[in-house]
Image: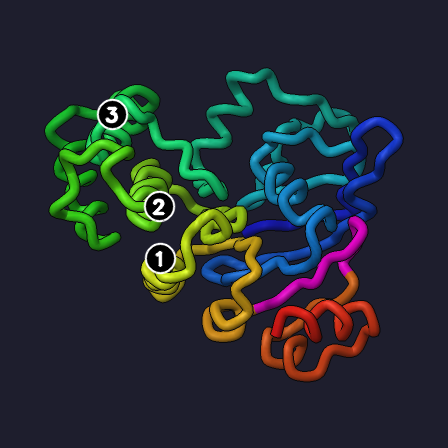
Amino acid sequence: MVLAEMVSKSFGSNEVLKSISLEVKRGEVMCLVGPSGSGKSTFLRCINHLEVVSAGRLSVDGDLVGYREANGKLYELAPREAARQRRDIGMVFQRFNLFPHMTALANIMEAPQRVKGLPKAQVEKSARELLARVGLADRADYYPAHLSGGQQQRVAIARALAMEPKLMLFDEPTSALDPELVGEVLDVMQGLAASGMTMIVVTHEMGFAREVADSLVFMDAGVVVESGHPDAVLSNPQHGRTQAFLSKVL
């Protein structure tokens, strides 16, 4: 589903990603862990072309992300084409980014109606089903200001799912939440994984990574230091840098 080949990204002279190569199969969950500033979130943003890679290539479901290839050369897609491609990739951010002037239901309905042009009745039915799926059927008419952080993040997940993505990206989805609200968001993500959704999750929740992920990738200073099955990496890290990091977070 996702293939990264020697992906690099620089901001000026600062090389944030250095030749990252990774593969995520359809239906798999990959967790990215590592210290702040290691390039995890930048890599996630490259996958849906919110950031343009400086070198290398990224593919989602066999299609180049952000580019087309002709005569052996890569040409960047026009913004409209890139946006069309991005429809198939759901993303959930640290901050919930809900529209504050819209109810939970309206937040979820907005994109399928405006972007896909689907009939309102069909979109509303689907949106209510998604709210039920994330445990918020009774909060359809609530505005974000009247929802807890955990509830807002669950609405954000439902909003991303409303576009029926083939891939979901999560950028530290629980880091802005009070500790007692983390579990309700992770439960929804666990249900998504169980349903077969392909997911890449930047997280500090090692218990979630161990229980749900098919692969765990430890990044530091823009490189993949170590990767493998979560049990193997967490229980018996091979690299000294991984060992030092895990000793502080486990």
Tag nearer the camera, 3 or 1: 1
Amino acid of disc 3: Met
Crowd class of label 2 (few under 14; some 14 to 19; many from 20; radius 10 Å): many
Q: In this view of the protein, which residue sits in the foreground, 28 or 63?
A: 28
Residue at x 88% of width, y 31% of height? 13
Residue 17 in view of the camera = yes
Disc 2 from disc 3: Cα separation:
16 Å
Q: Main secondary structure of the magenta part?
A: strand
Asked whether the beta carbons under mark 2 and mark 1 sit within 8 Å of each other, the answer is yes
Quarter of the figure with the C terminus: bottom right
Relative to 173, say whether 89 is above or below. Answer: above
Q: Which residues are magenta?
A: 215-224
Q: Where in the figure is residue 217, as x and y percent of width and height?
A: 66, 63
Residue at the far right in the pictured view = 13
The residue pinned by badge 2 equals 149
Crowd class of label 1 (few under 14; some 14 to 19; many from 20; radius 10 Å): some
Under circle 3, the secondary element is loop
The residue pinned by badge 1 equals 181
The residue pinned by badge 3 equals 102
Relative to 102, say whether 144 is above or below. Answer: below
Residue at x 78% of width, y 49% of height? 222
